[in-house]
Image (cartoon, coloured by chain):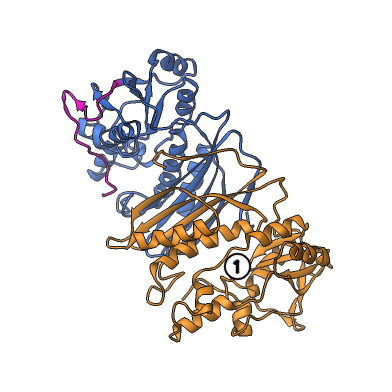
Chain colours: A orange, B blue
């Protein structure tokens, strides 16, 4: 800290880099949530991009804009909490004034031994799985709007998303063919994966989290569960089990026809979180 | 591109990372300059942070906020120009709406063989040098405000700052003790280097660029010339000469007393660009 750039020891294996920008009033409603949640979510969503590749975080830098009078200490508390919980040290930053409170987080990660998992490797016949039931974050936002307290468990799921780092590494070790994080909702992100892999899909089951709706499970973003595609789901589940991780849930299969993208035998309309409150 | 994070081959030697955020209306006056200049300056200032360590750029990611109606193609043209000129590929990004047009650039760099140069290594008796005369950027801004065209050479110096990458690498090879880039002006940055190294200085000469004033040379930021401190200025100059680089200019000496920070035998008031138009 204090120099023009931060200096790190050599990265192990492949280097990963990703950037995410989070804006107050766009990604978080200041009438409903404290400012520290903006900092937490900014770091968590950036770290989740590393989880989605099977990587691990190495370090992050944070660039903030804010108007005069912003409680930067509160914002920083959320940033520091997420950095600490994901073991991703903040090694540098920049701060300038602006009309918005915005937090741009860039994470540097590594995949020891290489083999970062891309979105583009899904093959016809592969099984599609997710790391957990969906819709908790969207349900938490709905409950908060209806007056639920900040410590309501679903509201906490919305405020404090947890990047699935251990799951991403386990999936990489299990040799999954494709992976991504569900940051914008299954109904949108599944199309993205299919597009990248030039395949179609038959979605058969959507695991809906307790107290969430099907619409929230399909369209709600920010659960940050991982979407995984593998030719050997039993091996994937065995590796998760041996590491004490929740068993991945089968949700469908990959098909050759890129135009075939169905849910309950009907075309799955792309729906998902479009960054609007 | 298209995956959650970009994957890079292993970095050579030390890894450097730095982030800079540039905001329209704060760092660039939209009444005087085209939007593409914002993109160019954002990338150039981030890459300059690598030059200041003696590093070289490896890749960058860019996070942009903008209100509806922003000409993102024009912004991108400036980003792409600077990335191309500094050979720093843009490998990922994020785009979201906001009230401001802001560009957060994070650069990843490397120092082969290690030995990144910090601000903290200056020692009493060392010679202080800069890579060139100062004040061109500030003079260009003044001339633009007075009606000079965008292609006036000094206005171009303001619009298209050039990171001193070759100079930074040469200085590292010459074994300089401390280095930084003059992004906020010599009158402020020299204090920062002295503070980091816990030393004082006696500034004896301020090289003023042609058509610039002394105030612009001392207080004008964004020249991005490098400030270098070495115990062997002859060796530094010989290495610059052999590489076809402009001869560094002596501007003063490092002294032991941290409170001694003089220019023409008077205390040098910290002055510099405070990010206000």
Measuring from the top left, give residue B210's x and y in whole percent. Answer: 27, 27
Residue drawn 69% across and 56% down?
A: A169
Q: Is residue B251 visible?
A: yes
Direction left: furthest residue: B266
Residue B8 in the magenta stretch? The answer is no
Residues rendered magenta in the picture: B251-277
**Location of residue A181 by image quarter:** bottom right
Residue B258 in the magenta stretch? The answer is yes
Residue drawn 38% across and 26% down?
A: B228
Measuring from the top left, give residue A234's x and y in whole percent. Answer: 83, 67
In screen coordinates, is A243 left or right of B116? right
Measuring from the top left, give residue A46's x and y in whole percent. Answer: 54, 58
Query: Is A68 located above or below residue A138 in the figure?
Result: above
**Location of residue A173 by image quarter:** bottom right
Q: Is residue B71 visible?
A: no
Residue topped by disc 1: A224
Picture mark count: 1
Predominant secondary structure, magenta span: loop
Q: Residues within 10 Å of mark 1 (few under 14, many from 20)?
A: many
Query: Is B236 located above or below residue A66 in the figure?
Result: above
Of residue B221 and residue A155, the one placed in the foreground of this image is A155
Query: Is A243 located above or below residue A8 in the figure?
Result: below
Q: Quadrant of the N terminus of chain A?
A: top left
Q: Secondary structure at mark 1?
A: loop
Label 1 resides on the chain identified as A
Residue drawn 63% across and 72% down?
A: A188
Of residue A158 and residue A18, the one placed in the foreground of this image is A158
Measuring from the top left, give residue B111's x and y in whole percent. Answer: 54, 32
């Amino acid at each position: 800290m204090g120099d023009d750039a931060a200096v790190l020891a050599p990265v192990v294996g492949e280097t990963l880099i990703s950037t995410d920008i989070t804006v107050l009033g766009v990604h978080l409603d200041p009438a409903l949530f404290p400012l520290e949640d903006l900092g937490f979510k900014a770091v968590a969503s950036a770290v989740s991009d590393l989880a989605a590749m099977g990587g691990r975080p190495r370090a992050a830098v944070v660039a903030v804009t804010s108007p005069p009078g912003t409680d930067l200490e509160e914002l920083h508390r959320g940033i520091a909490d997420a950095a600490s919980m994901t073991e991703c040290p903040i090694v540098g930053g920049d701060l300038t004034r602006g009309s918005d409170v915005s937090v741009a987080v860039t994470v540097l990660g590594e995949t020891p031994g290489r083999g970062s998992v891309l979105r583009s490797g899904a093959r016809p016949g592969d099984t599609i799985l997710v790391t957990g039931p969906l819709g908790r974050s969207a349900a938490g936002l709905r409950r908060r709007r209806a007056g639920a307290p900040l410590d309501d468990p679903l509201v906490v799921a919305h405020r404090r998303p947890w990047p699935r780092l251990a799951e991403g590494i386990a999936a990489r070790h299990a040799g999954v063919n494709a992976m991504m994080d569900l940051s914008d909702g299954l109904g949108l992100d599944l199309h993205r994966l299919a597009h990248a892999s030039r395949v179609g899909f038959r979605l058969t089951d959507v695991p809906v989290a307790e107290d969430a709706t099907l619409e929230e499970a399909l369209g709600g973003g920010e659960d940050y569960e991982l979407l995984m595609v593998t030719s050997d789901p039993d091996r994937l589940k065995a590796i998760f089990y041996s590491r004490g991780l929740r068993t991945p849930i089968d949700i469908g299969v990959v098909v050759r026809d890129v135009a075939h993208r169905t849910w309950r035998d009907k075309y799955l309309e792309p729906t998902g979180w479009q960054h609007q409150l």
